[in-house]
Amino acid sequence: MNQGRLTSRLLGLLFAGWLPAVLLLVVTIAVGPALGSLSRPLFVIGCAIAGWYAWRQSAAAHVQAAIVLFAFAPFVRRFIDVTIGFDQASIMLIGPLIFILMPLPSIWAWLSLTVRPRNPWLVPPVIVLFCVAYAAAVSMLQNDWANAANGVLKWSAPILYAVALQLRARSDGELVNAMAGAFFVVLPITGLYGIWQYVDPPAWDRFWMNYASITSAGYPLPYMVRVFSTMNGPATYGTFTATGLLLVGFLRPSWQSLLAMGPAALGLLLSLYRASWLGLALGLLFCMVFAATRVRAVATGVSIAIAAACAVLFTPFGDVITSRLQSLGSGVEDGSGAERLEEFVTLWNAPDSFVWGSGFTFTDVGVAGAMPIDGQIIASWVVFGIPVGMICLAAYLWLTLWSISAAWRMPTREGVVLGSLALGALVVHMPLTSIASGEIGVLFWMVFAMACPWDQTKSMPEPARSLQRA
């Protein structure tokens, strides 16, 4: 697709798909406090309507609106909470998940086709969905229906969304360019907000940190926050920002990318989330291998390094960043790394070793004495148990390897960047972050859908082509 046509189309999506999502966020902030607790279910209903509308416009418009909602819905939730009271159930965070479920009828339409081409790329998502059903059954056997429903929504919504996107995705890179366009707008806003949050956390962020069960966001005091910006935690914000930096750095014009990368890079550093730093560095190194991205990889790496150096040398929080950077080389002396290794020992020494899993029923990490759950390996062990968990992990390994291969199957900048994101998910995020559910899960499954596009399946008959054009 011609670059000029692509740019004009992406600009058009700002009004075609973003507008309802942006209006929903703004209106909720403006009138939510006056509506009281009613604003929370209304926000969820608004997300459903916005999702239906955006999908009717195009898959690209829906992807962009989804990025906006996942980036800013937690901020809106905190703003409402500080005015009408803390919501332990986090009802408003269901909204973006409902938003990405609106393409479900398109999956049903594909299943209804009398003649369908073989699509082997959909085998791993189906395997994971069966694992999710197993975990839900385990929770229901414990009479924990609330956690069963919550777990199914958080784990299955990103998968179903990926299936719908994969049926619309093409190897021309339209969807991944749309994703980069969304991050071009989102990154500077979240980056600047993150800097403000670190220097002087707003009242709604302090309120949330005092009541939420999160233990990794630092303290609600100036210069003592681990930046989570407008999102729901440092890990989520760090992963979103690192992903956005790769996409913007390679898929937007260089002068535009610099506008977004400065505040975003500083916000990423202040999150102190080292997994996202490592994932970003690995992605840049991967892109240096390929001719299509080598020059931009060097330029992007140098730009981020300059931003990091300026943050260390010329800001009042340079010592915090330097200390965190130095901890990357501490090895076994790193307390966080030791805790993660201890989680495996704790699980193995448990009375039943979690052989059959606990389903979606487990103790909140905010409860004293509860074991944290870090990384997809630990999450799969706890939720599914050893046999089913190994099947689930094998499916994720299958998915990431296929997604990495996009760098060779589609040797364009878009394909290489998607491959780099998948490599970061495999090497860094799977051991250290749960990539299966919530906001991070949405990013992972988006990458899979775009890296394994429908038009690379073989023997596509005319009915399937018609569905894709619809």
Image: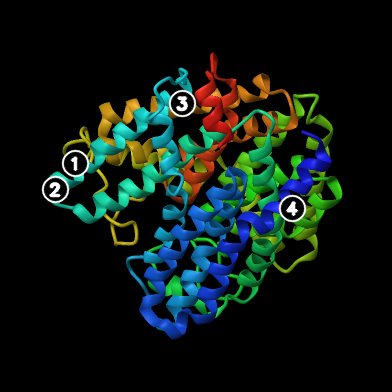
Q: Earlier in the sequence, mark 3 or mark 1?
A: 1
Q: Vertical placement of 87 versus 397: above or below?
A: below
Dot 3: element: helix
Q: Position of residue 468 (x, y in %)?
A: 55, 32
The residue located at (49%, 54%) in the rendering is 51
- Judging from the image, what secondary structure is the residue with disc 1 in? helix
Hey, which quadrant is residue 25 in on the image?
bottom right
Does label 4 or label 2 sit earlier along the sequence? 4
Residue 238 image position (x, y, % from top left): 58, 52
Residue 101 location (% of width, % of height) = 42, 48
Measure the C-alpha gap from mark 3 to mark 2: 30 Å
Q: What amino acid is found at the position of numbered circle 3 in the picture?
A: Leu
Left or right: residue 245 compared with residue 400: right
Image marks 1 and 4: residues in contact by CB distance under 8 Å: no
Q: Which mark is residue 142?
A: 2
Q: Which residue is mark 3?
A: 397
Q: Is residue 12 left or right of residue 59?
A: right
Distance in Å between CA atoms under marks 1 and 4:
46 Å
Q: Are dots 2 and 1 in contact, CB under 8 Å? A: yes
Q: Residues within 10 Å of mark 3 (few under 14, many from 20)?
A: some
Which residue is denoted by mark 4 in the rendering?
A: 11
Compare residues 112 and 17 and report the one nearer the observer: 112
Identify the mark at residue 52; answer none if there is no mark.
none
Asked whether the viewer can see residue 448, the reply is no
Frontmost residue, 223 versus 141: 141
Between circles 4 and 2, the one closer to the viewer is: 4
Badge 4 local density, few (<14 within 10 Å), some, or many (20+)?
few
**Mark 4 or mark 3: which comes first in sequence?**
4
Q: Give the mark nearest the N terminus, 1 or 4.
A: 4
Q: Residue furthest top?
A: 459
Amino acid carrying mark 2 in the image = Gln
